[in-house]
Amino acid sequence: MLHVLASGAVTINFGNSLAKPSASVLIILAGAVLSIAPSLLILLTGFVRIIIVLGLARQALGLQTTPPNQVLVGIAFFISLFLMEPTLAQINHVALQPYLHGAMSASSAIHHGEIPLKRWMLRQTGSQELAFTSKVAHQNFQSHVMSTPLATIIPAFLLTQLKSAFIIGFVIFVPFLIIDLVVSATLMAMGVVMLPPTLVSLPFKLLLFILVNGWMLVMQTLVNSFR
């Protein structure tokens, strides 16, 4: 509310009342969210772990461009949304909808929306990684974990995602590495040195991957890795 003082100065009193955000505010917020959506997808979901594991699985098979990068990114995107769906639904229930209906201020909505996101990210974050980022930020995370700011949780979360992705990738690489070694030793014993071992081992690796339903196992491992 505008108030004109006797001196001619104009003051603005927002009061304690809540109102629905205007259409212009919603448009600005939507534009801001869309502009940072790729960063949010990478930083705040399991996208990093999923895309790295899928890339390592493709490399372990010896395939350079199959499946294409667009396919791997699409798979990682939708698996990330699938895993985040309960958290996103909770954020929508406790923060977004009350804000859109004027029952909650913007700052309160942000505060309430951080809680489900923090709870999900902390479940995926290792204690060593969180201790490291908290130490760098001069914070004590063991006393009040939920009070740790997102600026401290996000780096620890990403470090944990990288660690988990490379562990899963190592497990995927081992059987295919054994096939490469066996094929290479066999070709050397036969005196075939002009034929690349990777070219001979590729059909065997594909056959093994098909027989064990490899993509299903990779996806199952990825989903189960998010505790």
Image (cartoon, grey):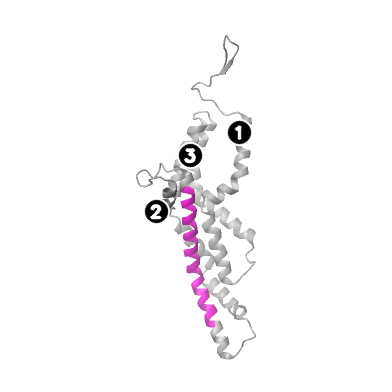
Residue 91 among those drawn in magenta: no
**In the image, what residue type sits under mark 1?**
Leu
Measured as percent of width and height from the top left, residue 182 is found at 52, 82
Measured as percent of width and height from the top left, residue 134 is found at 42, 48
Q: Nearer the viewer, residue 82 or 121?
A: 121
**Residue underneath mark 2:** 127
Q: Is residue 11 above or below residue 167?
A: above
Residue neighbourhood size for the residue with mark 1, other residues' Cα within 10 Å, grouped as few (<14), some (14–19), many (≥20): few
Residue neighbourhood size for the residue with mark 2, other residues' Cα within 10 Å, grouped as few (<14), some (14–19), many (≥20): some
Which range is magenta? Answer: 153-182
Spatial distance from mark 3 to mark 2, Cα to Cα? 23 Å
Spatial distance from mark 2 to mark 1, Cα to Cα? 38 Å
Spatial distance from mark 1 to mark 3, Cα to Cα? 17 Å
Sooner in the amino-acid sequence: mark 3 or mark 2: 3
Which of the image's four quarters has the N terminus? Answer: top right
**Residue underneath mark 3:** 113
Between marks 2 and 1 in the image, the one whose residue lies nearer the viewer: 2
Residue 188 image-quadrant placement: bottom right
Residue 168 among those drawn in magenta: yes
**In the image, what residue type sits under mark 2?**
Ser
**Residue underneath mark 1:** 26
Main secondary-structure element of the magenta-colored stretch: helix
Between marks 3 and 2 in the image, the one whose residue lies nearer the viewer: 2
